[in-house]
Amino acid sequence: MNGQATSASRIIVALDYPAEPPALAFVERIDPGQCRLKVGKELFTRAGPQFVENLAARGFDVGKSLCERDKLALARSLMAEAEEQRVDLLLPIDVRVGASPEAPEAQVTGVEAIPADAMALDIGPGTERLYRERLRRALAVFWNGPMGLFENAAFAEGTLAVARAAADCPGFSVVGGGDSVAAVKQAKLENRFDHVSTGGGASLEYLEGRSLPGVEALQP
């Protein structure tokens, strides 16, 4: 892997194998060449660019969904790396779609049937159940990034459902990043996590193994 950054992408990594340290589950934006697959045995993707690009890379029609076509090769490399390392790459099985981000209501459809005139803007209820079941087995959670366009109430339920599932995780739980914190507060769950911080980007860079100037300055 060549370590290309993809700032739009977010994934969940759920590690539910007690024999392997550390056990993590997170929704994240992360440099593909770093710790993404090295810390987890399951990857979850949301109903945003990461999901759309993985779906498009597999030949599915994604309608009007935002899709960075120049990232399709990166999506294919992610899938190949996951298979090579025996990591379960979990894509949404259904999504909530709308004609635009301002759509007043959502329609649920399978990922194989996204209408040509619609955008995938949130994960669907089937995916919520799938992710909830996997998160319940995780030993720890690090979350950065909503599941969809939670600012629009029509597309907020996927994010709120994952927030509730992550809050129920019996392990150590961290929420990082402004959007994630806003979603957790919207769900009134901020007191259910062990640590909540708006410093999402820096946390992800730290997980990637990058040097952080602020941290370096504190070193003896």
Image: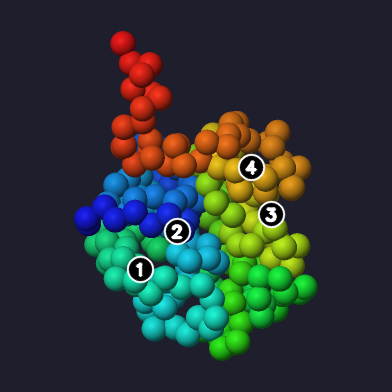
For residue 220, which numbered disc appears in the image? none
Could you tell me how many numbered marks the image carries? 4
Classify 10 Å Cα crowding around label 4: few (below 14), some (14-19), many (20 and above): many
**Are the two marked residues, 4 and 2, in contact with CB atoms closer than 8 angstroms?**
no
Give the mark nearer the N terminus: 2 vs 1. 2
Residue in the image at 60% along x and 43% along y = 178
Q: Nearer the viewer, residue 19 or 56?
A: 56
Q: Secondary structure at mark 4?
A: helix
Reply above or below: 19 against 105.
Answer: above
Q: Amino acid at mark 2?
A: Ser
Q: Where is the N terminus found, in terms of image quarters? A: bottom left
For residue 9, which numbered disc appears in the image? 2
Quarter-wise, where is residue 210 in the image?
Answer: top left
Q: Amino acid at mark 4?
A: Val
- Per the model, the C-alpha gap separating discs 4 and 2 is 18 Å
Whether residue 129 appears in this view of the structure is: no
Q: Amino acid at mark 3?
A: Leu
Indicate which label's residue lies in the foreground, 3 or 4.
4
Q: Amino acid at mark 1?
A: Lys
For residue 181, which numbered disc appears in the image? 4
Q: Nearer the viewer, residue 218 or 193?
A: 218
Q: Nearer the viewer, residue 153 or 140?
A: 153
Q: According to the image, label 1 marks what residue?
A: 71
Q: Residue 9, percent across and down?
A: 45, 59
Reply above or below: 164 against 218.
Answer: below
**Are the two marked residues, 2 and 1, in contact with CB atoms closer than 8 angstroms?**
yes
- Per the model, the C-alpha gap separating discs 1 and 3 is 28 Å
Q: Secondary structure at mark 1?
A: helix
**Are the two marked residues, 1 and 3, in contact with CB atoms closer than 8 angstroms?**
no
Give the mark nearer the N terminus: 4 vs 2. 2
Q: According to the image, label 3 marks what residue?
A: 160
Which residue lies most toward the top here?
220
